[in-house]
Amino acid sequence: MDVLARCLPLLVLLLVASSIIAICHASKGDWDPGYRACVEQCVNTGCIGNVCYLNCKLPVNGADLESSYNRFLHDMLYFRWMEWDCPSECRYQCMMNRETERMNAGLQPIKYHGKWPFKRALSLQEPASVAFSVANFAMHLQGWISFLVLVYYKLPQRHQGKKSPYYEYTDIWIIYGLLSMNSWFWSAWFHSRDMDITEKLDYSSAVALIGYTLILAVIRTFNLRIEASRVMAAAPIIAFVTTHILYLNLYEFDYGLNMKVCVAMATIQLILWTCWGAISLHPARFKLWFIVIAGALAMLLEIYDFPPILGIYDAHSLWHALTIPLTYMWWSFIKEDATFRTSQQIIRAKETGNTKKVR
């Protein structure tokens, strides 16, 4: 029974990972005749029916675009930054109109250009995902700062008067916090407006983070404290992740390949954490296992995708929401690990000192 309990997180993880790799999604809305005809008309005329849009350089419902008020709206820096140009505005408005027609006909929503039909809010393309990404950023910032306060100010230091923590993994967790905040920053930006540049920055930063957490998992679970051994473990992973990012950005942005790479790296590191918790008997291993199982189950939202509730909350945004408490628990585990390792180091230092005195 004890062996089964220890293997449970690993079994759940492997089941979820295999399901993710096996599933792929396709968009039907792109080829909908009504949608395509609407977009073509809107781009050519700047209007859908009797409604015209400021984003298109055409008269707006009979008004003169050269009037100061309309020119101000058209040239607003915010909308230029968001790049809601005429084609983008037409695709959005035609998508929403087409979905209204489908709903009235009793049909289910479909995806357009790989995304569900979301309702914009404050010109944010996916408001729920943006909000949850910002919340994840804030949670990582809070965890990162509290970790720094713990290891540099609350826990004993190696040398009096100098900030030299006993915890030998301090530096790699500091870098982890910075990369995590960077990834969630670009996630919020990408979900606010899906453009080529925001998409590449979001995906690249996410791949970099997953690659680094794999390095971190190898270093911590194998207890690599010597710099040379850390470099040897990190070098091939860094080379692989760098090559993959360059491939995505310079050769082909292959979504399927990227999913397989990310799931593979995530699966490997979570297997390492699960096995390490069982072998090391770490005092916080149950919290670690809970995070592994909950994280794996949360990934099911990426598998069983569904249309956005109220036009705002889809499976992906809810996955972002679930990572908020998991992030808090993860940083809690990190701080418990720092406290545990520091106490071990202090005991070892005292034993070494007593041995020297006896000699």
Image (tube, helix red, strand yellow):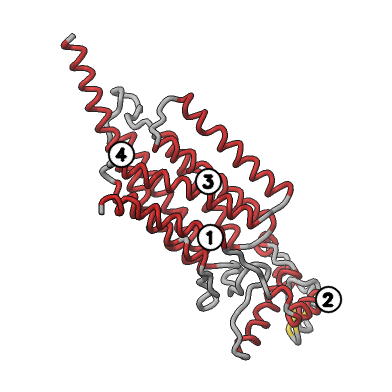
Q: Secondary structure at mark 4?
A: helix
Tell me whether the residue at label 2 lies in contact with that at label 4, contact meaning CB atoms closer than 8 angstroms: no
Q: Nearer the viewer, residue 254 or 307?
A: 254
Residue under pointer 1: 20
Tell me whether the residue at label 1 lies in contact with that at label 2, contact meaning CB atoms closer than 8 angstroms: no
* In the image, residue 139 above or below residue 106: above
Residue at horizontal 50 percent and vertical 65 percent from the top: 317
Label drawn at residue 44: 2
* In the image, residue 101 above or below residue 350: below
Q: Amino acid at mark 1?
A: Ile
Quarter of the image with the C terminus in it = top left
Q: CA distance from mark 1 to mark 3?
A: 19 Å
Where's residue 239, x and y in %?
A: 61, 36
Residue at horizontal 65 percent and vertical 68 percent from the top: 26
Mark 1 vs mark 3: in front: 1
Residue under pointer 4: 280
Give whichever of discs 4 and 1 has the lower sequence position: 1
Where's residue 329, x and y in %?
A: 35, 52
Q: Amino acid at mark 3?
A: Leu
Label drawn at residue 209: 3
Q: Secondary structure at mark 2?
A: helix
Q: CA distance from mark 2 to mark 4?
A: 66 Å
In the image: residue 257, left or right of residue 316: right
Count residues near mark 3 (Cα–Cα under 10 Å), then give few for <14, some for 14-19, many for 20+: many
Q: CA distance from mark 1 to mark 2?
A: 41 Å
Q: CA distance from mark 3 to mark 4?
A: 25 Å
Where's residue 274, x and y in %?
A: 37, 47
Q: Secondary structure at mark 3?
A: helix
Mark 3 vs mark 4: in front: 4
Give whichever of discs 1 and 3 has the lower sequence position: 1
Give whichever of discs 2 and 4 has the lower sequence position: 2
